[in-house]
Amino acid sequence: MGSDSNFCGKVESDPNSDPNSDPNSESDPNSESRNFPFPVRVTTGEVLWELGIEPASSLADAQARLLHDNIAYLPTGVLAPGLPQLLACRPLPGVPSSAHSLAKLIHPFGGDGYRVVSVAHPNHLARIREFLAVTRANALLLHGTEGEPFANPCRQPLLEHFAAGAGTVCNEADPEMPADMPQLPATRDAATTAAWIAQALSGEQPLPPPIVAQLGCCLIGARRQAPAAENPRDSHLDPYVDP
């Protein structure tokens, strides 16, 4: 996460008001193309590494970590060996393809699970909303931040909960910065972000209200699935066939 001047200082734009906007593009209107001061994104994998969470080496390793630590980071190449090659096929350098949208929809569990599905552009919400409904998904849908499935810490996005494909609003969008917005780190490198997360988990740092709202929606969604999988071993990682 960045500081107020990084995340919070950006002005959200309506993509429909931009004559050069492509609704089919995967570009994020909140990303580097809008003069973000840091040219390179920090990935979840890098932050998790700084937190001492190393990538799982296999599906069995990831399953063991889920059962023991309640968290696992599984690279796409381990989950589906052919996926990295598919994701590398881009129409233009630096521009994600539709494969990136499909990858975000992967359901890695053989049993019940609750996915957090994000889109890079608000124009994609309608299409993904329809997909989640048709596939009777259990998921949380939102417009993500910097390519990652978390709410913008300074502007509350719409959070939509899906239970067996039926969608409801879990939290309304609010474009205004929360009045009780806590101070965020001045830089967003992996080490600084990991240190802030560790402090937040220990209660030393307050969480931004949009992140609290997202966590609350995830808890609601996960609890609704609990009766179908009271034993954590009922939900297991499901290997994918190499395309």
Image (tube, helix red, strand yellow):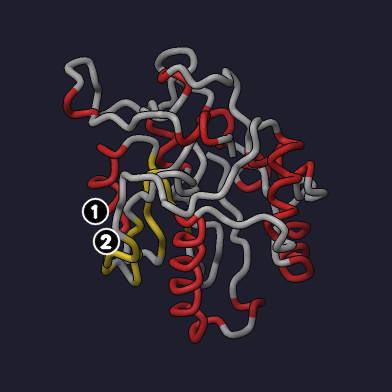
Q: Which residue is mark 2?
A: 133
- Kindly check if marks 2 and 1 are in contact, taking CB atoms under 8 A apart as contact: yes
Could you tell whether 42 is left or right of 132 in the image? right
Q: Residue at x 50, y 50 (%)?
A: 181
Quadrant in the rendering for residue 44 = top right
Q: Identify which residue, 230 or 58, lies in the foreground.
A: 230
Q: Identify which residue, 220 or 134, lies in the foreground.
A: 220
Look at label 1 and name its amino acid.
Answer: Glu
Q: Pinpoint residue 164: horizontal percent, then vertical percent.
A: 33, 71
Quadrant in the rendering for residue 185 = top right
Q: Pinpoint residue 202: horizontal percent, then vertical percent.
A: 74, 62
Q: Residue at x 42, y 46 (%)?
A: 118
Look at label 2 and name its amino acid.
Answer: Ala
Please identify the quadrant where the N terminus is shown. top right
Could you tell whether 127 is left or right of 201 in the image? left
The image's mark for residue 130 is: 1
